Image: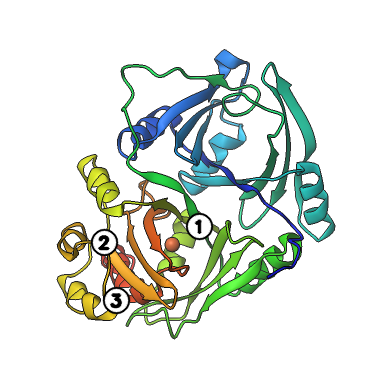
Amino acid sequence: MGQTDEFPIDGWDHLEFYVGNAKQAAFYYEHAFGFTRTAYAGPETGVRDRTSYVLEQDDIRFVLTTGLRPDSEPTRFPCAHGDGVKDVALTVADAGEAYRHTVERGARGVVDPHWIEDDWGRVQLATIATYGENVHTFVTRTEYSGPFLPGYQEIPRTNGQPATGVGLKTIDHVVGNVELGRMNYWVEFYERTMGFTNIIHFGDEQIHTEYSALMSKVMADGQGKIKFPINEPAEGKRKSQIDEYLEYFGGPGVQHVALLSDDIVHTVETLQDQGVNFLSTPDAYYLDAEPRVGEIGEDWDDLKRLRILVDRDEEGYLLQIFTKTAQDRPTLFFEVIERHGARGFGEGNFKALFEAIEREQALRGNL
Ligand code: FE2
């Protein structure tokens, strides 16, 4: 490569979810997904209109926020959209510079760059808008040693907390669903404002079933750490699953968050034991998976038992599985992924996945 990265990003900082009841959602992510509660902000820490719980597992940081007043933004968001991701926050060396760079290139500024501080040091924050009501907050935390951000209180480990994670390591990718005809707009937005490049493109001829279709382009930052696939619906005989999302979410938003594991068999087995529901895959999938994918390090019986999907590209293979939607609206879900060289997104599995999602969609009477 050898080129300089015009918009260097250190990594994923956190995902902030706006939810109807953060206290209960935190319990779900702790007990089902194996996260540990590490910090809290709310009335007890001087925040008047919301409460936020920080949950961590290895490099993954989720923040669950609920509004405390009818007119507060985190109250309105889940009324309009259901529980969902509001902020895909990115760690950068200079949040002020990241803000200026993106806003000069046409991004809409939401919160101007500013420093916040407490006894642990200081953090610079700045926020821009992206698709739907979503935002990206740039976070510079090199001068901070506290639990999360100034204003948050550390939560000491207690006996009531689950002991360990389930092997989830980091965020792999965050997928956005946008309206028909808007995919290229947002692809161009990430190119222009953050210097991302389009690393993969799927047309509707690749991702379709008998009934519905979608188009997808994957945008990645200069170092390939941050990956944003962007989907739009395509014409099919019946309603695309992307249309179902857009209808129930009330516009564009985050469709799924993929979390990387280095032992997917253990991770998925534990998640299932702890009550996480995954999409099923027909037995027929496994009849041709082995000849299609070839030799892998895992036991095929484990993959078949747990319904883990497998795919191979020129660089290696990957294993993946998708949860059912994580709230009552058929919107956000999670993916668990393990990579062995492959840098794709399981293109060979799209059809199997699509059919599995459509079985769920049909059960809801939306297909
Ligand atoms: Fe994915």
| Residue 279 picture quarter | bottom left
Which of the numbered marks, if any, corresponds to residue 248?
A: none
Q: Which residue is mark 2?
A: 308
**What's the residue type where badge 2 is placed?**
Ile
Q: Which quadrant holds the C terminus? A: bottom left
Asked which secondary structure carries label 3, the reply is helix
- In this rendering, the answer to whether 19 lies above or below 233 is above
* Label located before the other in sequence (1 or 3): 1
Asked which secondary structure carries label 1, the reply is strand
Where residue 311 appears, x then y in whole percent? 34, 72
- Is ligand 1 less than 8 Å from the beta carbon at label 1? yes
Residue 111 visible in the current orientation: no
Report the side of 231 relative to 365 (left or right): right
Q: Which quadrant holds the N terminus? A: bottom right
Q: Which residue is mark 1?
A: 173
Q: Which residue is mark 3?
A: 293
Real-space Cα separation, disc 3 to disc 2, in angstroms: 13 Å
Front in this rendered view, residue 140 or 247: 140
- In this rendering, the answer to whether 3 lies above or below 82 is below
